[in-house]
Image (cartoon, grey):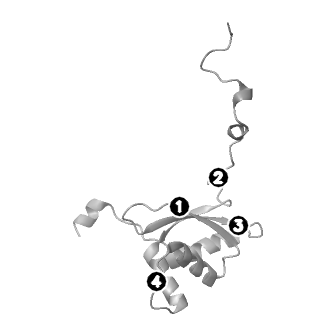
Amino acid sequence: MSAIPADTVPVDTVPHAAKSAPKRWSLNNATAGDTLDLSESRTYDCALDIRRAYRLTGNFCIDLQIVLDDLGVLDQVTYRIKPKALMSDCRQVEFRPRHHVHSGRFAEILESIRGRIGAEPTPPFWARLFR
């Protein structure tokens, strides 16, 4: 009879991948990264103006890349687009500075992005009903 309780798993049977979890970005450190709410429609309109085009594909990833390239910050930040909520114009994008960008410059970049294509805060649904 074994002295090990039935609900415990011996250490050597746990796969190696389960022992070491991948490191995640920490949002607690303001210099490590920041998440912005960006408007899909404002990003599309801005990309249209930049390219002087009549119509684009409407792909948010490509439109955002066009805007960041026009701002001259594409080589200074990395970004990750989070999944979109249903029936929303707002996309959450997590920006991270590259290793050569200082925190002051990163804050300036975020402000320029927020000013150009940032999403307007949406009022609650009940407030929109009474408009």
**Amino acid tagged 3:** Ser
Q: Which residue is mark 2?
A: 26
Q: Nearer the viewer, mark 2 or mark 3?
A: 2
Q: CA distance from mark 2 to mark 1?
A: 15 Å
* SS class, disc 1: loop
| Residue 40 position (above or below residue 56) | above
Q: Residue furthest right?
A: 100
> Contact, CB < 8 Å: mark 2 with mark 4?
no
User: For the residue carrying disc 2, how many other residues have a C-alpha within 10 Å: few (<14), some (14-19), or many (20+)?
Assistant: few
Cα–Cα gap, marks 1 and 3: 23 Å
Q: Position of residue 65 (x, y in %)?
A: 59, 77
Circle 2/circle 3 CB separation < 8 Å: no
Mark 1 touching mark 3, by CB under 8 A? Answer: no
Residue on which disc 3 sits = 103
Looking at marks 1 and 3 on the same chain, the residue that comes earlier in the sequence is marked by 1
Tell me which label, 4 or 1, sits earlier in the chain: 4
Look at 60% across and 62% down and name the residue there: 34
Q: Which residue is mark 1?
A: 82
Residue 41: name its quadrant.
bottom left
Q: Which of the two discs, 2 and 4, sits closer to the camera?
A: 4
Quarter of the picture holding the N terminus: top right
**Label 2, label 3: how far apart the Cα atoms are:** 15 Å
Q: Which residue is mark 4?
A: 45
Could you give the CA–CA distance between mark 3 and mark 4, rounded to whole angstroms? Answer: 29 Å
